[in-house]
Image (spheres, rainbow, N blue to C red):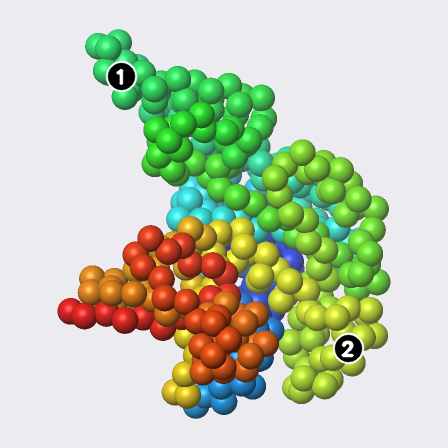
Amino acid sequence: MKAGIVGLPNVGKSTLFNCLSNAKAQSANFPFCTIEPNIGVVNVPDSRMEKLEELVKPERVQMATVDIVDIAGLVKGASKGEGLGNQFLGNIRECNAIIHVLRCFDNDNIVHVDGNVNPIRDKETIDIELQLKDLENVEKRLEKVKRAAKTGNKEAIVEEGLLNRIRETLLQAKSARTITPQNNDEEVLMEGFQLITAKPVLYVCNVDENSAVSGNKYVDQVRELVKDEDAEVIVLSVGAEADITELESYEERQVFLEDMGLQEPGASVLIRAAYKLLKQQTYFTAGVKEVRAWTINIGTTAPQAAGVIHTDFEKGFIRAEVIAYEDFVHYGSEAKCKEAGKFKVEGKEYIVKDGDVMHFRFNV
């Protein structure tokens, strides 16, 4: 599962990507400095891991991860191939969620492609390009499905109806994610269309260091604009985040954060938000060899969760032994959880909860 960072050129995308992944994406004061998408595998900050490590004292610890993709800046006309539009739009299509970076700071030394700072206009520029690309794909699909619908094909009739609704929505300059599928068939179809504007989105307002805690007038404008969207807005000073990553020790980073009035780096908040945006959650395995966080989709069953470790675990699944994270921490060990009656045995129908500490029994 991948989250793609998008935005206009020079809004701080590659600098943010570097902060998140420590990968060496170019960060330069001109458009298109990131030609190929850069992919970073980023650890998901989780304070629960520290507690489990403290209790279990394992030989190693393995965090959950999320893939972040740095996509080059989009410009007006990208949907028609302007800049490197088609390539960039293809990169976005391959992602499962979008992190949309908006420039919310004034700085005469950093050129804005449209001449001045206006996050509302910038958001609309990106939205329109993505909507136009989706509209092009929807209209092509409609041409094909109309012929089948005329013959009375029921599936084609359902698809035609949904495509027409999406087309009307896009023509109103609204994204496909604002459409609610009316039944399971429409849900499956929506997923199959792979529309860019149907992907969940997270807005990152890139502000100056002094606005990192409470935002500024630009952030207020963004919040007002997206209040009806089902989307989170995160305020981040990408420049300050870059400075934090340069510091050698944890203590130095904490002093820097305290001076800014922050409890943790904004990058940590963003990574967790991206994880949530991708509808991911975590279960743990905890033993003396390893404490590990495993990434699963929300709604995953116990056998499916076992399959994340190894396909044989899913094929030969017998049962899952489960302790809630809170119980594990409260009682301090698996043995004490058993004594307190907090050790559960679950079967194939069990839906794994975020934070479950699990052990699987299987036979192949």
Q: Secondary structure at mark 2?
A: helix
In the image, farthest residue toward the left: 364
Q: Secondary structure at mark 1?
A: helix
Location of the N terminus (image quadrant): bottom left
Q: Residue 43 location, x and y as percent?
A: 51, 70
Q: Residues within 10 Å of mark 2 (few under 14, many from 20)?
A: some
The three-letter amino acid code for the residue at tag 2 is Phe
Distance from disc 2 to disc 1, alpha carbons, whole Å, reads: 62 Å
Location of the C terminus (image quadrant): bottom left
Above or below, comparing residue 239 to residue 180 in the picture: below
Tell me: 289 left or right of 13. Answer: left
Q: State which mark lies toward you, 2 or 1.
A: 1
Above or below, comparing residue 162 to residue 72 in the picture: above
Q: Residue at point 56% right, 86% down?
A: 54
Tell me: 134 left or right of 129. Answer: left
Among the two numbered marks 2 and 1 on one chain, the one whose residue lies closer to the N terminus = 1
Indicate which disc residue 154 carries: 1
Q: CB under 8 Å between callouts 2 and 1?
A: no
Tell me: 299 left or right of 258. Answer: left
The three-letter amino acid code for the residue at tag 1 is Lys
Q: Residue 130 location, x and y as percent?
A: 51, 36
Above or below, comparing residue 17 to residue 135 in the picture: below
Above or below, comparing residue 161 to residue 69 in the picture: above
Q: Residue at point 55% right, 79% down?
A: 331
Q: Residue 357 location, x and y as percent?
A: 45, 71
State whether residue 53 appears in this view: no
Q: Nearer the viewer, residue 302 or 235?
A: 302
Indicate which disc residue 292 carries: none
Q: Residue at point 39% right, 87% down?
A: 289
Q: Residue at point 26% right, 17% down?
A: 154
Q: Nearer the viewer, residue 252 or 314?
A: 314
Q: Which residue is mark 2?
A: 256
